[in-house]
Amino acid sequence: MFSRFLFQTIDRTGWIFLGLVALAAVLIPILNLAVPPDSAFHVSNTAMALWGKYLTYALLAVAVDLVWGYCGILSLGHAAFFALGGYAMGMYLMRQIGPRGVYAHPVLPDFMVFLNWKELPLTWWGFSSFPYALLMVVLVPGLLALVFGWFAFRSRVTGVYLSIITQALTYALLLAFFRNDMGFGGNNGLTDFKDILGFNIQAQPTRAVLFALSALALMAGYLVARAIVTSKAGKILVAIRDAEARTRFLGYRVEHFKLFVWTVSAVMAGIAGALYVPQVGIINPSEFHPANSIETIIWVAVGGRSTLVGAALGAGLVNFAKSWFTGAFPEAWLFALGALFVVVTLWLPKGVLGTFTAWSAARRAGREAPAGTAAQPAQ
């Protein structure tokens, strides 16, 4: 069954993408751990952490492309699901610090001791357990998406109005997590992590494993998204995107399909956030900022909407450009990002991958046309 799915639903571009990500999952950790630091082929800890962050962004972009590219839901709130998954993992990492914190409290994180908290809040119960934390990584973003989508899609909120509501949801969470009395670290967030599953989070082998897990999560996320969009439900999602009223008139429960893909996308975003936090070393309310959701939309647009692989490619390209620009021309980055979005909108509406695919198909058709003409029998 699984092998049939692989060979029937994944195209050549998908196989190339999966192969490159799998190669990176193996090669980058080897170049970091086995190659001496003075070698030209050595990959530093900083570079591996940076590329690991790009992989989590790529998974987030695939999640956004799943709802925007194939269902027409322009979400400006996926940063919320990403951040919630990150906070769930950050809370587990904070519980692992224990008495090694600045205030040496065996239970309470340092920021709670500083704020004169007397006992651990209910929301933190269970986060000393890694399986419980993983459950929350999936459950919290998924449940929020399920509840939000249930009311929004049943009310038939669509288009720009839905985009505004998702942005408002993200901004509300941003303001809530900034408050110290929420018990999530306030403006400073969660940081100073020590261990994960008993392993030093700063150690090279641990960082190598986190990188490999990020690559595997990206591959799994792509496969899940690909399975959805190539199924019968995926065809209905595209119909909803192109003509929602007509699809509803044909008898399909449109809100059910939208709720399903919306929830799956939110869970994928939460997993991306959970992998992001231990590699970056911090999670704070700025991750909820609506600008982050808007930037994710730009990644998908640059790479190619409705391609999945293009979304991941766009996340890598834009964030690589961001790292370079913020180092070389920090004041010009936002202008460059805006210019990039304008250029893509006007001259590359299908994105980098979509444009290349269309050009390649047209060139192939051009080569085959003369051969087909020559093969016609004389009348």
Image: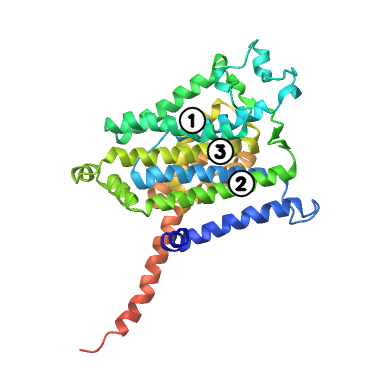
CA distance separating discs 3 and 1: 37 Å
Tell me if residue 316 comes above or below residue 279 in the rendering: below
Circles 3 and 1: CB distance less than 8 Å? no
Q: Position of residue 237 (x, y in %)?
A: 32, 47
Residue 185 sits in quarter: top right
The answer to whether one can see residue 327 in this image is yes
User: Does residue 24 appear to the left or right of 204 in the view shown?
Assistant: left
Q: Nearer the viewer, mark 3 or mark 2?
A: 2
Q: Position of residue 276 (x, y in %)?
A: 59, 38
Q: Of 11 and 335, which appears nearest the observer? A: 11
Q: Position of residue 367 (x, y in %)?
A: 38, 75
Residue 373 sits in quarter: bottom left
**Mark closer to the chain start, 3 or 1:** 1
SS class, disc 1: helix
Tell me if residue 191 comes above or below residue 38 in the rendering: above
Of all residues, the one furthest to the bottom in this rendering is 378
SS class, disc 3: helix
Q: Residue at x 19, y 46 (%)?
A: 250
**Residue indicated by mark 1:** 140
* Quarter in which the N terminus is drawn: bottom left
**Residue indicated by mark 2:** 213
